[in-house]
Amino acid sequence: MWSSQNTASAAVPALSEGVRVRLLHAAQGDPRAAAELAAALTERQTTGLDPLPAEPLALAPALLRTHRRDVRALPDDTRFLLLLGAADQYPVPTHAYARAVTAARLDTRPLDTAEAAGLAHATAQGIVFRDARTRIAVYESASMTDRREAHRLLAAVLNGEGERPGRSWHRAAGALGPSRRLAGELRLAARVARAIGDPGLASALAERAAALTPEPAERMPLLAQAAAEAWQSGDGDRARRLVAATDDDALGGLLALRAGNASEAFDALLTATVRHGGDQAPDKAAHLLARATEAAIYTGDLRRCREAAAVADALGILPPSTLGALAAAFEGRYDDARDVLEAAAGRCGPGGDPTQLIHSGIAALLLGDHTRAFTATARAAASARARGDTVTVPQAMEFRAYTEFWTGRPKAAEGAVLDALRQAYATGQDNGACHLQAALAMFAAVTGDEKVCRERADSARAYALGRGLGLPAALAMFALAFLDLSTGRYAASAARLRALAGFGPGHGHRAIRHLATPHYVEAAVRTGDSRVARAAHADYDRWARTVRSADDLALSARCRALLATGEEAVEHYRTALDLHASGTRDFERARTELLFGSALRRLRNRTEARDRLHSALEAFEHFGSPQCAVQARAELRALGERASGAPGAEDLAARLTAQQLMIARMAADGATNREIAARLLLSPRTIDHHLRGVFSRLGIRSRIELVRLLGEESA
């Protein structure tokens, strides 16, 4: 799918990435359809501020005109058989075509004409159309009388167990006008669809019920229900279109949280919390407050955290743990924050509510407990999949990515995060996609992929600043600062991290600033600004001692070593490494060994310095972090050591960055630069840059040599 979609990418360059993904999917990869659809969008639709229209292909009149002409050229009996097949497939697939043909004793030989024209052919399961536009043209070209007859025939044969929703759909599709009886039947059918785990079908039935109900007061609740089901099924654009016709501020706030302005989302969700709390619906109010908490977390606004906590107190609602903990931590009440986070992180058992599990993962991350954070977020994704809650899976991956970074698994995580990124874009969760882009920028910083790091970080920051998303904006800035730090640009790194500390809501984030403190201390010390470094470390050390995380204590000891000299620094480094041994941040352990080895070299403790630096070098090569490996080799050379060069040709994974290795394998499989760019959500120019880097690192000059080399690796 992605390779065909990319053919159209040049035709729609002005679209935001999320809109591009969804539009190219709707266009079935047809470049003409994509260009025509893009031209028909409003300016707000091209940027993702407004949802895409219903049935986007219907906006391509020139293409449909050609398809309609082809359909109208067919005999009447052929067209009716095709109409029956089209009505059986979209928007509700009911798999009743063959039974309807048999029950009505229809002659199927006229389908030979359609097959000869290359428009469609029959199978045991039904009609297979040449493409989606042909199916639309068949249905739209038919008269209302023929459509009603087709739906009547399909409804008549849907009498099996579990087929009630499909039968009700066809009965309603053939209705002449509003009908209280049919609307009631559709409501019941939607309930059945929901019970069997088909939110997409439930949404279609509820929306049709809203169209057929003669009571205006009943319309809005049905549309809100349809919007909620559409959202759960992963159809974000449809959900946003439907909710716009309602006064449901709760659902509107949720959709804004995932694709709009985070501050506006918070306001809408908190308003809905107050309304439902006043209606004595504590469970609903608590759920909405949890969503408002997520919005507050995304903005990074302490004022909003306090406001939500005040509402929870006024309504007598137990606030979400992450909300109370963030408010306490931001105010410096670290003991209170730790106790609340510990309680939340402990609720990470299997099979739980996905949203609660995500909150447990966030709590564990804030505590520095990456084992529990990984467990909670992995279980959140599994629980969401089991419940058919498509949209929650990429949300879980947003926070799982932090655990992958801190524990030094960027290569292993990159493919999973890319899948989550595509899923976030496809389901209309552009805010979540922005967060995942920032995570990928962080992975690229760790693996020394400077061009990709900058491209993803710039993309994430540009989007985040327009939506008030302080969390991904801060993470993207941290990625750029880490890249500078690992390549020896200490002044640039310190400047970025100082800016990160000064950013307000919607631009920065206190939690990311805290995570970045050990790196800020290193950059500040390297540039001679020890006064600022000591102040930053003092607060970090207080938090580390409060939560008692082995890794946080280790990093605090490393900061203390950087701020000390001589034997005092050596003792702090030894303490740091002892603490790292009980933690999970293996990548940071390697960085501590690198800094320790450098300090030992300056103290002329050559033997231990050599051992520490070799250990760090081995770890960096294992993690696929060439920039840090370069620093370790430079230190070894300063000792007079001949550090081993890049690994041999047989270990390609060690010679290439994670991104380069992925691109090299795709290229060896025959994918073009444009096809690779579409799969990885990068520009073709960036892919070309990567391939040139691959050729240079491997000492080859063509794709043919690349195919041969990778073939030897797999042999």
Image (spheres, helix red, strand yellow):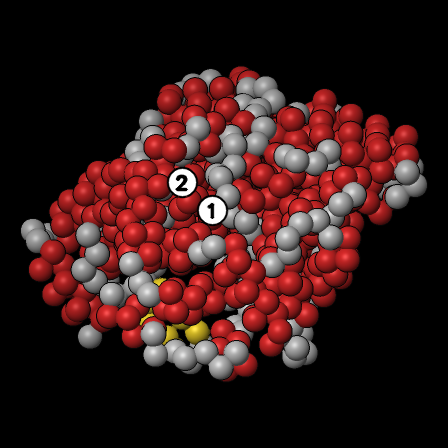
Which is more toward the observer, 127 or 711? 127
The residue depicted at 84 percent of the width and 32 percent of the height is: 274
For the N terminus, the quadrant is bottom left
Pointer 2 with pointer 1, Cβ within 8 A: yes
Residue 240 is labelled as none
The one nearer the camera, 482 or 165, is: 165
Image x and y of residue 479, in percent: 43, 35
Q: Quadrant of residue 109?
A: bottom left
Q: What residue type is labelled 2?
A: Leu
Q: Position of residue 418 (x, y in %)?
A: 41, 51
Local packing at callout 2 (Cα closer than 10 Å; few below 14, some 14-19, many 20+) is: some
Q: In which quarter of the image is the C terminus?
A: bottom left
- Image quadrant in which you'd find residue 116: bottom left
Asked whether residue 712 appears in the rendered view, the answer is: yes
- What residue is disc 1 on? 55
Question: Can you see residue 485?
Answer: no
Q: Which amino acid does the dot numbered 1 rest on?
A: Glu
Residue at x 52%, y 78% (from the top left corner): 104
Location of mark 2 (residue): 59
